[in-house]
Each structure stands twice: as C-alpha cells, then as structure tokens.
Amino acid sequence: MNHSELAAYLRSRRDRIRPAEVGLPAGPRRRVPGLRREEVAQLAGLSADYYTELERGRGVQPSAQVLAALARALRLDGDERDHLFHLADRPVPQAAHGPTAHVQPALLSLLDRLSTTPAQIMTDLHETLAQNPLAIALVGHRTGVRGPAAGFVYRWFTDPGARTLYPVEDHDHHSRVFVADLHAVAARRGKDPEVSRMVSALRRRSQEFASLWETRDVALRRVDHKRIVHPALGVIEVDCHSPFSEDGRQRLLWFTAPPGSNGAAQLELLSVIGAQDMTTGADDTQPTGTSRMTK
C-alpha cells in the first residue's frame, strides 16, 4: 500500500470540492480552497482523527467500507473510485450494492439539494446507501447493514420488526408492491445470481412471498402513497417519488406531502425534532463508516 500517494490523492480530491456542492455552508475565514478535513470525515461518517491520519500517510489501513464512504463523500466518479481502491491495495468492488457500493455522484448531488424533505439513495433491491438527516429522522438509520438483510424487501418478508414502519392495515399493499417491483428488477437484470439467491431464499422463508411471486405481477415502484408510523408524530401520510439512475441499479427516494396538509405540517415538525433521535424502531441500525450525508 502506498500511504503517501493515498494521502496526496485524498488531499487533491478534497481541495477541489466546494462546501456548497455537498450541502455545507461556506462559512467565514475559510483557509482551504475546498473542504476541511473534519468536513470530509463528517460526510463519510468517520472520526476527524482517523481521517487526519489517513491524509498524513501514517500507516492507517482503511477497509473497503471506509474507502467506499470516502468515495461518496469526495464525489469520486467510477475511475476515481477505482484508483482510490488501487492506492489502498484493496480489490475494486464489482457489485453495485451493499456497503461498498459506489453511489453515483449525480444522485448524491440531487440528495444534497433535497435538504428540506426526507430523501435517501437505494439500490434497485432497496439497500439504502445514503440518507439525509430528515430521512434518518423519518424512517431511521438504514445504512451499514450487510448480507441479505441489507435489502428492505428481504427484511420485510423475514423480519416482523421491519413492518412496524407501516400501519398493519397497509401491509398487504406493501407486500404486493414489493414483489411486483422485485419481479421487474429481476427481469431487467436478466439471469443475475444476486437476484436469484434473494428470490430463492424468500420463497423458502416466506409463504406470503412465495404466493405473491406466483402471481407474476410486474411493476417498478416509481411513485407511491404511504402512511409511515413515527414514534413521536404518529402516522404521517406522504407521497414517495423514486426515479432510477440511468443504468437502473440505483434509485433516489424522497418523501413529500401536499402543501397545507397534515402530512406537510408533520414533515415540517420533523425538521425541528429530527436531531432528538426519535427514529422508528423498524430500522434502527447505526451506520458504521458509511455515508450518511449529514449536514
């Protein structure tokens, strides 16, 4: 591992980013052209001391998950992300999912601009890759989960706790929508082993999923109306929008409510109490080294 080159590369990528590009205030008396070290650490979900050691080339051995978080925080494109992994002497991740997935910079830029509404970036299999603070306040931490349980669809059919996010009377609707969406993703990916393993596991573990899978309903979940159970605010009615990236592997999900509605008032209140850790228990997984895009 070339510690000095890795340190120089991180500094060069940090210097080129302006705070406004990642949703941070410029502030007065800024002495560096780009981001400060502590700002990169904040965006990547790392301690400032750890990131400082990386930039000083002090022999720190970053994991693949840490490198993925830094690639997101520094807005690296695919080639730049691969170079970062090469400098750290780590295999370049090939999958577009999981905690080391490379979030597309264009989606991250959009996420940064959605500062007044809950929003998060997911894979096509509903694995959450990045969240803004309002999304964490609304649905809880969802990044940093590994294995099959990283996908919310998988947890929906295997973990009863995941269902507390929605009222019981809405569960049948969400089950049908999740399965139809997964059918569409499976068709788009073709003979993808990741999807095949997920479908096989769910058919074994959930009779509900197996029955719904046999209906062969197909529909990508682009727009939906949801009722979300929040521990402090009660049931919040929101509209969900979920456009896909160009390759179809990632989607940006954001939550809105009609102006003047009760849901809009609740989302406004959420921005006030969001920092008080009043997140739902359905997905209260704390992120470990992944990008939370906290501003």
Image (tube, grey):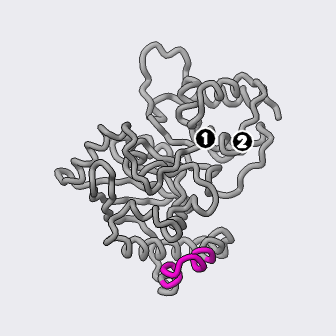
Q: Quadrant of the N terminus?
A: top right
Q: Position of residue 23 (x, y in %)?
A: 44, 34
- The kind of residue tagged 1 is Gly
Other-residue count near label 2 (Cα within 10 Å), few / some / many at <14 / 14–19 / ≥20: some
C-alpha gap between disc 2 and disc 1:
9 Å
Q: Which residue is mark 2?
A: 63
Residue 236 against residue 209 in the figure, above or below: above
**Which residue is nearer to you in this view: 148 or 260?**
148
How far across and how far down the image is residue 287, in percent?
55, 45
> Of all residues shown, which one is farthest toward the right?
1
Magenta-drawn stretch contains 145: no
Contact between marks 2 and 1 (CB within 8 A): the answer is: yes
Residue at image location 74% in from the left, 42% down from the top:
85
Disc on res. 289: 1
Amino acid marked by disc 2 = Ser
Tell me residue 11's x, y (percent).
66, 26
Name the outermost residue toward the left.
Answer: 260
Q: Quadrant of residue 177?
A: bottom left
Q: Which residues fall within the magenta stretch? A: 200-211
The quarter in which the C terminus is drawn is top left
Q: Residue 209: within the magenta?
A: yes
